[in-house]
Image (spheres, helix red, strand yellow):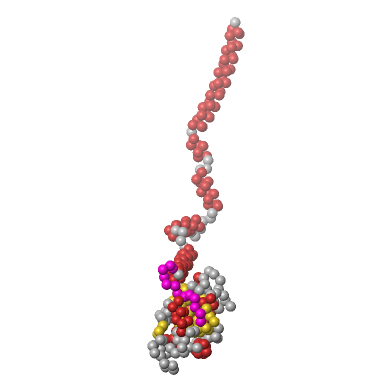
Amino acid sequence: MASVLAKPLRLVEGSLCQRCIALPARRTFASISQNPKHEIRSRPSAPSVLHSSRHHAQPFSSSPRRSYKTVEEAKSRYRLGPFSWQAGILFLFAGVGLTAYFRYEKARMARVRIAEANKGIGRPLVGGPFHLTDHDGKEFTEQDLKGKYSLVYFGFTHCPDICPEELDKMAGMIDRVKDKHGEVMKPVFISCDPARDTPEVIRRYLAEFHEDILGMTGTWQEVKDVCKVYRVYFSTPPDVKPGQDYLVDHSIYFYLMDPDGDFVEAIGRNFTVDAAAKVINDHIADWKGKIDKS
């Protein structure tokens, strides 16, 4: 009976002893885990590791750091914005170019308005049919003016001062236009004094000014008709005797005609040679059609 009871007691005692043996180990593990100071002190701290690695990666230097310069440059660029001296020069050239272009277009449109206004309905037409004789004795009509720009001037060979001055100016205009555009203009001198201005007289007279000027004359009625279509005023004194010297009063304008024979613009005495040549050259440059350069 006793032996029967003793065997379970031994088993219980064995199990109790094993539990007791395990208890101190648990307490020891728990005590170690619950006291983190030993664990923290035994490890190297993260900042110290980073600090040491940083010192090894980049040695100490007394010169400013590159990142600081970059930040300063970025701040400077931020203060200046997107502009630089290159952008300023580009902006200046663009402004000058646009200003010149708009001025050119404004002047061109003004010339176009002048030319169109002279062709407008309700305005007296300048130019038209006529029949004359040139200084070589050949017939000449308004059709012979077409194909080129023509510059028409009315005068007379016995004029003491105004006609020679204007013909000198005409010679300067011819040369300037020819230098820029070539043989695109036909200069014409029409006499308002057919009684004294024969083809031979006109030919010798015009040779003193410019070889390109083509002289015209005709009968008194033919001269009157051409002056009428060009709106030119002229008059001779009444009761003129043969051989008597006299003056002819007439309008003083250069009439610029386009290659189609249409009136473009009148150039008065107030124009200098350069200013008059510029007017002619600008109109020629604006012309979109064909021009005879022969």
Against 283, residue 67 (above or below) is above
Indicate the position of residue 199 as horizontal and vertical percent values: 52, 87
- Quadrant of residue 22 in the image? top right
Q: Is residue 22 magenta?
A: no
What type of secondary structure mainly makes up the magenta span? loop
Point out the image quarter for the C terminus: bottom right
Q: Residue furthest top?
A: 1
Q: Residue at x 53, y 50 (%)?
A: 54
Count of labels shown?
0
Point out the image quarter for the N terminus: top right
Residue 89 in view in this figure: no
Q: Is residue 129 magenta?
A: yes
Indicate the position of residue 103 as horizontal and vertical percent values: 44, 69
- Decide which of 129, 248 is in the foreground and name it: 129
Find the magenta span and give its range: 120-132
Residue 232 in view in this figure: yes
Q: Residue furthest bottom?
A: 243
